[in-house]
Amino acid sequence: MTKQDTPDAPDVSSLEQKLEYTFRDRHLLERALTHRSWAHESVRAGEEEKARSLHNEALEFVGDSVLGLIVADALYRSHPEVTEGELSRMKHRLVSTQTLARAARGLQLGEYLRIGRGEEKTGGRRKRALLADAFEAVLAAVYLDGGYEEAAGFVRRALGRELEEASPESAAAADFKTMLQERLQAERHLTPHYDLVETLGPPHARTFHVEVVFDDERVRGEGETIKSAETDAAHRALELLSAPSRVEEHSEEE
């Protein structure tokens, strides 16, 4: 049974333990856990304004800004030597839907959400975007209830590993792969995948060869780790797609 089995507010006591924060105003947390689908199903026709006062979208808005400040502050303090562009890429990765959804799963937020029947049927509790939005809303609830320091503590606990491992190198690696995926999805409506095709050298000095595959294209990259080889392949694929002849080809197809 999920925490939504009661028609009223979810039982947030166990969630407070996971958050390591006790709310003075629990209504903030309850609203943070309420999806608009539940709110609209819970009011009569014509009561849209009341529904807006029940669901978490306004809290998501606040949480997004608070999260950006907390992450920017943490990155600047731990990496004062890096450039603005590098800090921006690191921040982008830390506040991404993928990262926030993973943190939300770690807190089991999906179990506590109030969602509508339609969302329930389509697996809303497992949807990345819905979980990431809920994480931001819960952060906003902590911030509004306890202030900046409590909110920053929550973020440090929830994103601890990601914050510790954040670096210009890891952000750049994610950036090339993200840029390639976003470009291919926008231009060709497809998602690339990566194949390990060859491993060379002795155990202490391996070189990995990876191909990124999309349509009938295969672009090879290499590196001392599989991750760096994937990054190299994505970088080369972006260069290939940006070559003047390829740009002209794509323009003609459109």
Image (spheres, grey):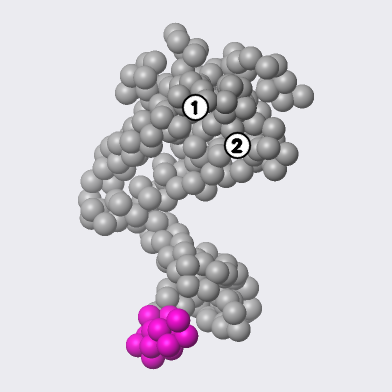
* 253 in the magenta segment: yes
Is 198 situated left or right of 225 in this image? Answer: right
Q: Looking at the image, which residue is at 55% across and 39% down?
A: 130
Kind of residue at disc 1: Glu
Q: Position of residue 27 (x, y in %)?
A: 49, 14
Instruction: Select label 1 or label 2 by which is in front.
Output: 1
* Residue 107, percent from left and from top: 58, 30
Q: Is residue 122 above or below residue 244?
A: above
The x and y percentages for residue 175 are 41, 61
Q: In front here: 230 or 67?
A: 67
Task: Name the quarter where the N terminus is drawn.
Answer: top right
Residue 57 versus residue 13 in the image, above or below: below
Displayed quadrant of residue 104: top right
Q: Is residue 248 above or below residue 209?
A: below
Residue annotated with mark 2: 105
Residue at screen point 42% across, 44% down: 95
Residue 208 seen anywhere in this rendered image of the structure: no
Mark 1, residue position:
48
- Within the magenta stretch, is there residue 34? no
**Image quadrant in which you'd find residue 24:** top left
Residue segment shown in magenta: 241-254
Residue pictured at 50% horizontal, 12% vertical: 26
Local secondary structure at mark 2: helix
- Image check: 122 left or right of 128? right
Tell me the chief SS of the magenta region.
Answer: helix
> In terms of depth relative to the viewer, which is nearer, 166 or 184?
184
* The C terminus: image quadrant: bottom left
Callout 1: SS:
helix
Foreground of the two, 185 or 105: 185
What residue lies at 63% left-to-right and 73% top-to-bottom?
195
Badge 2: residue crowd in 10 Å (few <14, some 14–19, many ≥20): some
Q: Kindly identify which numbered label has been placed on residue 173.
A: none
